[in-house]
Image (spheres, rainbow, N blue to C red):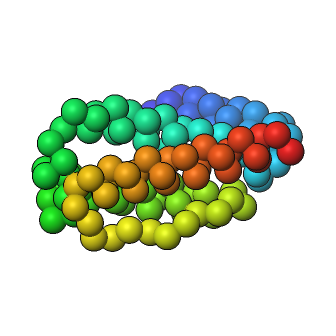
């Protein structure tokens, strides 16, 4: 049992040392995390591309999920110093999809500006 704990402590220490050795600024780290979020957003956009818009309205679970993702993208855009735009909370399916795409574009722009600086 002790050997396992020592091994875990060693791994944790090595991970912590590696993390501390990196010289990323906060904005670079945020841009990296936002890039991961962009991958998720692009995947969801591809998933709903051929879905009946009536099934994606905010009164359905799928629409609520998409609006939550869009709101997350807008918060991340704001955190990166971009212009997040307005958050949509209730809309028919076509507008929900449009909101997801708009929030994704806003985040992509903010990431691009952050990584250029």
33 sits to left or right of 38? right
81 sits to left or right of 117? left
Q: Please tell me whether residue 73 is drawn above or below residue 90 in the rendered image.
A: above
Residue at screen point 50% across, 47% down: 104
The number of callouts visible is 0
Q: Is residue 7 visible?
A: yes
Q: Please tell me whether residue 74 is drawn above or below residue 87 in the rendered image.
A: above
Residue at screen point 77% across, 40% down: 115
30 sits to left or right of 35? right
Q: Position of residue 33 (x, y in %)?
A: 60, 44
User: In the figure, residue 41 lies in which quadrant?
Assistant: top left
Q: Is residue 65 visible?
A: no
Residue placed most toward the observer, 112 or 35:
112
Q: Position of residue 80 (x, y in %)?
A: 69, 57
Residue placed most toward the observer, 73 or 85:
85
Q: Position of residue 99 (x, y in %)?
A: 40, 56
Q: Please tell me whether residue 25 is drawn above or below residue 38 in the rendered image.
A: below
Residue placed most toward the observer, 38 or 103:
103
In which quadrant of the rendered image does the N terminus lie?
top left
Residue at screen point 58% across, 50% down: 107
User: In the figure, residue 91 lies in which quadrant?
Assistant: bottom left
Residue placed most toward the observer, 60 or 10:
60
In which quadrant of the rendered image does the C terminus lie?
top right
79 sits to left or right of 43? right
Residue at screen point 44% across, 62% down: 71
Q: Position of residue 39 (x, y in %)?
A: 48, 34
């Amino acid at each position: 049992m002790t050997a396992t704990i020592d091994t875990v402590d060693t791994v944790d220490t090595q991970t912590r040392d590696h993390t501390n050795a990196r010289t990323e600024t906060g904005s670079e780290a945020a841009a990296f995390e936002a890039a991961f979020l962009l991958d998720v957003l692009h995947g969801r956009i591809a998933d709903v591309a051929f879905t009946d818009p009536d099934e994606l309205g905010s009164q359905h679970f799928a629409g609520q999920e998409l609006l939550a993702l869009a709101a997350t993208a807008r918060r991340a855009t704001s955190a990166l110093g971009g212009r997040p735009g307005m958050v949509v909370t209730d809309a028919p399916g076509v507008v929900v999809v449009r909101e997801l795409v708009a929030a994704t574009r806003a985040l992509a722009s903010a990431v691009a500006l952050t990584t250029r600086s």
